Structures are given as C-alpha cells and as structure tokens.
Amino acid sequence: MKTFVIRSDQQQRTGFILDRYDWLYLLLLLIPISLYELSLKAVRINTLPESVGLLGTVALMRSDVLFDLGFGLFWIGLFAATDGLARKWLVVPVFHAASLLLVLVSTGAHGFYQTTGSSLDFGTVNFFLTSPEEVWPVVESELSLGAALPGLVALLYILFGPALVVRALRKRTVRGAEPVSAPSPRRRLSSPLYLAGICLVTYALISFSSLPGGVSSGVADESFARDTFVNVAMSEIEAAGDKPKVDAEAIRAGLPTDTELVETDGTQRKNVVMIVLESTRAQSVTPYNPDLDTTPYLDDLSKQSLFAEEAYAVVPHTTNALTASICGIVPPDRKDTESLGDEIPGRCLPELLSEQGYNSAFIQSPTENFERRPQVASNMGFQDFLSEEDLDTEGFQRANYFGYEDDVLLEPSRRWLEENADDGPFMVTYNTITPHHQYLAPDTYGREEFSEDEIVDDYQNSVRYMDFFVKNLISQYKEMDLYDNTIFVIQGDHGEGFGEHGRYQHDNVLWNEGIQIPLIVLDPLREARNVQPPASELDILPTVADLLGYRIEGGEYPGSSLTELPEDRTLRFSCWYENKCVASLRRDLKYIYNYGTQSDEVYDLSRDPEEKNNIIDSLPAEEINARREDLLRWDAETSAAYDE
C-alpha cells in the first residue's frame, strides 16, 4: 500500500492541494466506502415498518453523509500535509486500517440490525470483543458463503485495490509521457492555518453528524438516524446522562442478603422443580392463546394449577430472568450480568432451602460457557450443575447453536433423582433451550403448520416441542412416585419478538411479545385457581416459600406470593442493553421510556393488547414525568445494587 508521484510534464495538470494520483488513491477508497455505507442505510430504511418517503430518507441519511464528508476531508488534509516516509509508513497504513474498521463496523451494525431490529451501540461492541466464545456461535449462525464472499472481496479491495489501480495508471502514464527537462512540483498548502481550517471543518461535519434528523415521526429512533460509527461512540458518551443520583450504600443495605426460611405449623417439606421454558412467550402457548394449539399439555396443566393469567419477565434475558425467579431480586442489565458469577446481592431459593435439608441441582441443555452459568448457579446455592458438556447427546438433534433438544435432559434427570431423591427433599431447576433463536425446531414429534412466516412457524414448532418435553419430564416424576410430593413451577424466562414493533429476539423487546410469559405453579394436592392481578418473575420465590409453608425472616423480597398478589401495584421492566429502554405497568397502562432516543410510549392494554396505538398524547404531562422519574430512579437503584 503506497502512493505514487509521477515526475513528468503531465504532472503539471494537478488538482487542488494534491496531485491527481493522490486524489485518485484517496477517492478509490473514500467513494466506495461512502456508497457502501449509504447503501446499507438505504436497505435498513426500506425495512422500517412505515414508509418515510424521499424527504424522510434524506433526513435519515443526513448524519451518514456528514460523517462521510468529515471522514474524507480528514484524510485529504492529512495526505496534503505529509509526504515521503511519513505518508508511506504512517498515514497510508492508518488510512487503510481506519477504512477497514469503518467497513467492519458498518457491516456488523447492518447485520445486527437485520437480526435484532436494534442499532449497534458501544456496549454491544464491547460485549462482542470481550466474549468471543459466547458471541461467535450466534454470528456464525447468521453467516453463509454468499454473505461472507462480498465481505472478503471488500477486504481485499481495501487492502490492495487503490495501490494496484494507481500503479497500473502510473505505468501507462510513464510509457506515454514525453521527456522533460525538469519536473514540476505539485502544489502543497501546509501552513498551520490551513491545517487548522481542515481540522475545524472536519470537526464541524462530524459534530453535525451526531445530530440526526428524521425521527420526529416515530418510525425510526435517534440511534437509527445517526451514522453507525457516530452512534457507537455517542451511545457510550450519553450512557448514564438521565439517571439520578442514589445512595448506593443504603440500597445495598436494604437487599435481602440475611434472609432465612422459618418453619411454621403449615410447613411441608415438598420437592421443588422449576422448569424454565427458554424464549417462550405467553401468546405462543395455548393457555394464553386458545386459538393456537401448540401446547395442549400445558393447557391441561394450567387448569390444575395456580395459573397466572398475566405474568411478566423483569429483564428479557435468560441469566437475568433466572436471577429474578430463583433469587427474587431485581436483576441487572447487561453491564452487570456477568458479575452474578462473583456475587448475587440476595439469598436465593436453593441456598435458603439447603438450610432446611434440601439437595439441589441445576440441569440445563445449553452449553455451560454462556455468562459464567456454572458460577452463577453455584452462587445461587445449587449443589450440582449439569450442562451440555455433561450430557450424552448422541441421537439427539441440535436445537440451535447453544444446545440440543431438551429431551437430552431426561436421562441425566432420572440418574440424579435416583441418587438423591431418597436423601430428603430437593430442588431441581431444568433450564431448556429449544425455542431459542435460531429455531431449528427438532422434528422428534413431527411438525405442524402454525404460520405462513417460515421463521415464526419454526419458532412455534419449537414451542410445541417444549410441550412434549414438559409432559415427558412430569411423567418421569410420576413413574418415580415423586409427583404428588413435588411443586412444579413452569415459566417462560422471557418472550420473543418477530418484528411486531420492529425488533427481533428478546433483549431489547419490552412490548408484550418480549416480556409477557407463561407462569404455571402446579401443586398436585392443591386446588387450582386462576390468578388475575399481573404477576412477575419476582413473585416466584415468595410463592414457593408460601406453598411450602415457610415464613421469610431477616429481610424482604420485592415480590409477593401468587396466593395474595396486590391488586394495585407497579411492575417495572428493563431492556438487557444498558440505557436502552425501561418500562412500567400500573393497572392497564404500560409506559415505555427509550432514554431519549425516541418518543415515550403509552399503551392501554385493556383495549390495545397488541400495543399498536400509542396514547401518550392523551395523558397529562405531569403523569408522564412522574412515571419517567420513577423508572429512572428504579433503574439507578438497580445499578447501585450491583456496583461495588
């Protein structure tokens, strides 16, 4: 990679500042990169749920155009200010490296948006870089030869294309040039004033690119309208600007870190089994959607159980959902998720029950590597941990990049029960994986057609598979004479989005497709009852303690037993991505705050369960402000609970 200066008579016909070969070298990279970035942005704009028209498209591309102009001007100025060895060994390599980085970030951000519906931010980039063993299987699942080949061609062009083209033209020019007595030097402007001007204009262009337009309609948010590279940088700068100051010491002092279970006259030493249904949303299971016959067995169970008619995840991500359900405390967002492997600021159900003589095990079908799951399970108090690495997977189908179909858990479950069930009561958590993206839908039990959308149909068939797994597992308990003396908690860890509100999967989906989950608590010897007040994953620990007949002392958990849920309380939720979105539900009104990247949202779930009609303009500004302040304080207090 190097530039070429032609000392010939023809070089007198130079352009302003740089000779024509320098201009050619620069533009051979700058123009394709700019066109590439703008093309990707145009594709994303075309996927928006509503058309924005020509003017809207121009407005949404304004940030990208300004950034590209600033990026180009910076390198033009740097080329004009340097020559010789400084340019050859410093400026040109850095120019190519910066161009390559820009293309990589733009390509990654485009693929990320196409897969999740969310814009790439700094936290996500950092997560990708620091957790490659967790992220690569996900990336690999989205790659194909057809998708990788253009990237490889682009990489080779960035590294070698401009030099090869300029070299070829130089040779052609030299062969056709006439001898001259002396070369004419190219014009150079290298005064401090010139350099300062270049830097000032570059700074102005890139600064203006951080002020996106085209978001007033609500079709696209601010992070979408910004240039990808600018948004990655700005997302970190703006990270915690909205959060209020809180007393971290007081918050940590109030956490349930000294709780214990105390026996009462009604204490029953029953077994506890938690079946966590991965990525299973309420609207995709039959008890919550009778028109969809995916889970007839769960439908039957719901009629024999404490059945939460409306239940919600707190943070739509598995490790965080496990923390809410098993530990009864508000889980962190992504920034502190892995800290759960070091400390959980609360006493969890396995630890509490171990003091009552319970054995415990955490058994999962996915790989153990994700988010330090063995350490997290240990910190929760589980004595035994089994994952894909401990299972015999021969003869079982892949469910996705994280693991095998969940029937692979049945034989290890039987072995553990045979070894431990006679030693006293126990608690076992089964963490499943089948409905997780990429929805390979094992055909162990055949397939049915639930949707014309192929991806949704694969997902619904994956959920249907879970119905067979739950039936098989509970049948195992019946065969081993453990059923009547066991309380079964069957829950979704979170939901799953398929573009209903422009986002996919779950991490950033706070509409009901992402956080409304099935929740069924089966005690075979207890009378069935429907629970009408909205329930939360935070209610599971108090519910289990209540059904076992224990009293909790030494601290308070934020949830309540399903047997006595308050009629009028506020439930709060957070996206897994930090500072992305938070929401609250009180009575039938759902409020979503998007940290300033787009307008607030309010939905009346009693009239609009699909959250299609944002009625925020019909509410008093004072009420919206109060809800926003409440959520921001809750979010700040949650962060403080996990920040030492």
Image: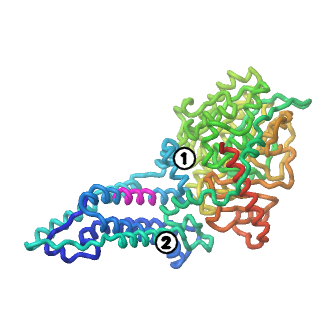
Q: How many marks?
A: 2
115 shown above or below 622: above
| Earlier-in-chain disc, 2 versus 1 | 2
Residue holding disc 2? 61
Q: Residue 630 has which mark?
A: none
**Could you classify mark 2 by the number of other residues whose Cα lies within 10 Å: few (under 14), some (14-19), or many (20 or more)?**
many
- Foreground: disc 2 or disc 1: 2
Where is residue 300? Give x, y as percent: 77, 44
266 shown above or below 128: above
Give me the C-alpha separation between circle 2 and circle 1. Answer: 36 Å
Taking the spot 70% from the left edge, 53% from the top edge, the residue there is 635
Whether the magenta-drawn stretch holds residue 273 is answered as no
219 shown above or below 146: below
Taking the spot 79% from the left edge, 35% from the top edge, the residue there is 259
- Can residue 297 be seen here? The reply is no
Amino acid at circle 1? Leu
Amino acid at circle 2? Met
- Can residue 168 be seen here? The reply is yes
Residue holding disc 1? 440
**Horizontal arrangement in the rendering, residue 532 relative to residue 373 (left or right):** right
Residue 165: quarter of image:
bottom left
**Horizontal arrangement in the rendering, residue 111 relative to residue 583 (left or right):** left
Where are the magenta residues, as a range? 96-106
401 shown above or below 573: above
Where is residue 530? Give x, y as percent: 84, 48
- Pick the residue in front: 179 or 261: 179
- Pick the residue in front: 526 or 220: 220
Q: Residue furthest right?
A: 265
- Judging from the image, the colouring scheme is rainbow
**Horizontal arrangement in the rendering, residue 601 relative to residue 201 (left or right):** right
Residue 98: quarter of image:
bottom left
Where is residue 619? Give x, y as percent: 78, 70
